């Protein structure tokens, strides 16, 4: 399907590093500890950005493509900004907010995939 190595690598890393956080968040949310779930997600994201990427950059120089800077970074900022606004609304993360967040992710994946098809 001629999907770039970056997308495959990012998807595998994202799934592998997010599965423990998803399990922790589900358990915390069922027990009524939404603050723990949110802290776990934010902490894992910060850890991934600073520690894992920093370690990889120490081992080998990392180059970032122009399309990643122009598309993925702004998308990430929009998604994170939306999450922070949602959590600030009543300090609760409700089902409809989760649906919106999943919808944003689906829009991101769809547009990212369609951009790759368009570029081929």
Image (cartoon, rainbow, N blue to C red):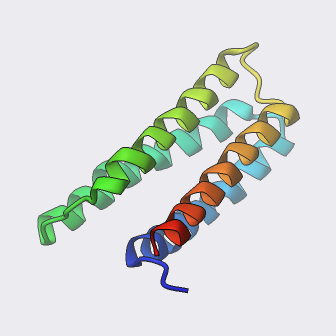
Q: Is residue 81 left or right of residue 102?
A: left
Q: Is residue 117 left or right of residue 23?
A: left
Residue 34 appears at what percent x and percent y?
Answer: 73, 33
Camera-side residue of 1 and 16: 1
Camera-side residue of 58 and 99: 99
Residue 7 appears at what percent x and percent y?
Answer: 46, 70
> Which residue shows up at 14% across the image and 71% down it?
59
Residue 63 appears at what percent x and percent y?
Answer: 19, 63
Q: Is residue 69 left or right of residue 61?
A: right
Q: Decide: is 1 above or below 107.
A: below
Camera-side residue of 77 and 118: 118
Q: Residue furthest bottom?
A: 1
Q: Residue furthest top?
A: 90
> Which residue shows up at 63% across the image and 36% down it?
38
Quadrant holding the N terminus: bottom right
> Where on the picture, by quarter, is residue 88?
top right
> Where on the picture, by quarter, is residue 87?
top right
> Which residue shows up at 18% across the image and 63% down it?
57
Q: What count of labels does the image hold?
A: 0
Residue 93 appears at what percent x and percent y?
Answer: 76, 29
> Where on the picture, by quarter, is residue 84?
top right
């Amino acid at each position: 399907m001629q999907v770039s190595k970056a997308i495959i690598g990012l998807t595998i890393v994202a799934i592998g590093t997010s599965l423990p956080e998803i399990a922790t968040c589900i358990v915390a949310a069922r027990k009524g500890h939404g603050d723990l779930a949110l802290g776990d997600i934010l902490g894992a994201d910060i850890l991934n950005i600073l520690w894992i990427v920093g370690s990889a950059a120490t081992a080998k120089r990392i180059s970032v493509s122009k399309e990643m800077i122009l598309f993925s970074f702004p998308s990430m900022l929009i998604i994170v900004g939306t999450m922070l606004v949602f959590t600030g609304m009543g300090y609760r993360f409700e089902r409809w907010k989760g649906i919106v967040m999943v919808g944003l992710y689906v829009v991101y994946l769809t547009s990212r995939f369609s951009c790759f098809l368009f570029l081929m």
